[in-house]
Amino acid sequence: MVNYHSSEDGLLPKTIDGQDIVILEVHPNYFNDHHSPIPITVEMLVEELGYNCLNPHEYYYHETAEYGGIKFHEGRFYLCFVSEKSKNEFTFSLICEFTYLHELQNLHYDFTREMLTLKSKA
């Protein structure tokens, strides 16, 4: 399940199913006409997704995310692995940049096989 802003009722949890695929075959722009991606924010990471902040406004980790966590740098979010750790010092290997909630949800699922849901929608 991924979350999008919807023209129909605000924040809408959406699972793509067979009916959606049929609609998209007939009306290719249907999904984009009625939905838009949700930009990820630091507040969303902590308050809605359950990430913990290790260094203020810099590195965030999730209990189930063995891959490492999220680096927030110069207004951008990066999925990363912690490649070296010592006392409160970390060396990160950046994997990829992401902008939207559904991108993080997909990445998190790929690495953990667990759904990452918003607390307000759980």
Image (cartoon, rainbow, N blue to C red):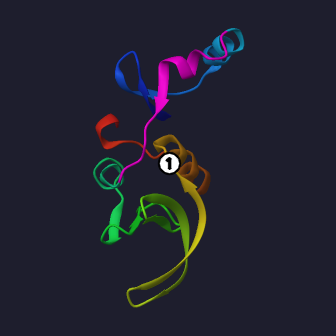
Tell me the amino acid under the disc marked 1. Thr
* View extreme (right): residue: 25
Q: Does residue 31 appear to the left or right of 43 in the view shown?
A: right
Task: Establish if 19 lies above or below 76.
Answer: above
Q: Residue 97's quadrant in the figure? A: bottom right
Q: Residue 96's quadrant in the figure? A: bottom right
Residue 31 position within the rendered picture, expressed as x and y whole percent measured from the top left: 56, 20
Magenta segment includes 102:
no
Residue 122 position within the rendered picture, expressed as x and y whole percent measured from the top left: 34, 37
Residue beneath disc 1: 99
Task: Establish if 116 lies above or below 86.
Answer: above
* View extreme (top): residue: 26
* Residue at the spot 61% in from the left edge and 51% down from the top edge: 110
Magenta segment includes 29:
yes
* Range of magenta residues: 27-41
Any part of residue 113 in sight: no
* Residue at the spot 31% in from the left edge and 56% down from the top edge: 46
* Residue at the spot 31% in from the left edge and 47% down from the top edge: 48
Any part of residue 102 in sight: yes
